[in-house]
Image (tube, rainbow, N blue to C red):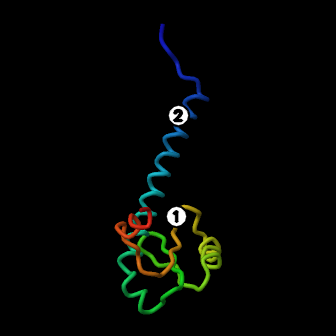
Amino acid sequence: MSQSTSPDSARFVNTTATEQANVETISGAIQTSQEAFQRDLPKLLTTHPMQWVAYCGIKRIGIGPSKSDLYRHCLDQGHKRGEFVVRSIEPLVSEDVDALSEV
């Protein structure tokens, strides 16, 4: 007796695989954005301290005084949620310092 897959269940499997690929692509874009931010942070600290910056992959989308305004700007430019990051331009706190605050 052979086991068949209904068209509906095949579509579900394909959708699930596509969604997984999208999640991996988005995760990669976010990772690339984080790396670009860390790369540029030393210069940003001298040129735009205490502001906000947005990245989509290696591309800097904008710099501004407000996280919400910059987030809205990214969406207005056609970027989708999860494809970009908005970060505060301030010194990174090392994990060692974070661990001390938990003591």
Q: Residue 55 or 19: which is nearer the viewer?
A: 55
The residue that mark 2 highlights is 13
Image vertical order of residue 51 relative to residue 19, above or below: below
Q: Which mark is residue 83?
A: 1
Tell me the mark number nearer the camera, choosing from 2 and 1: 1
Q: Residue at x 46, y 81 (%)?
A: 90
Image vertical order of residue 43 relative to residue 67, above or below: below
Q: Which quadrant is home to the C terminus?
A: bottom left
Q: Residue at x 44, y 67 (%)?
A: 101
Snapshot quadrant of residue 75: bottom right
Horizontally, residue 5 falls left or right of residue 100, namely right
Q: Residue 24 or 69: which is nearer the viewer?
A: 69
Instruction: Locate residue 29, reporting x and y percent.
Output: 44, 63
Q: Residue 7 or 46: which is nearer the viewer?
A: 46
Contact? badges 2 and 1 (CB < 8 Å): no
- Going by the numbered disc 2, the residue's amino acid type is Val
* Residue at the far front in the pictured view: 103
Q: Which element type, helix, strand or loop, lies under badge 1? A: loop
Instruction: Locate residue 20, reporting x and y percent.
Output: 48, 45
Q: Residues within 10 Å of mark 2 (few under 14, many from 20)?
A: few
Q: Residue 77 or 44: which is nearer the viewer?
A: 44
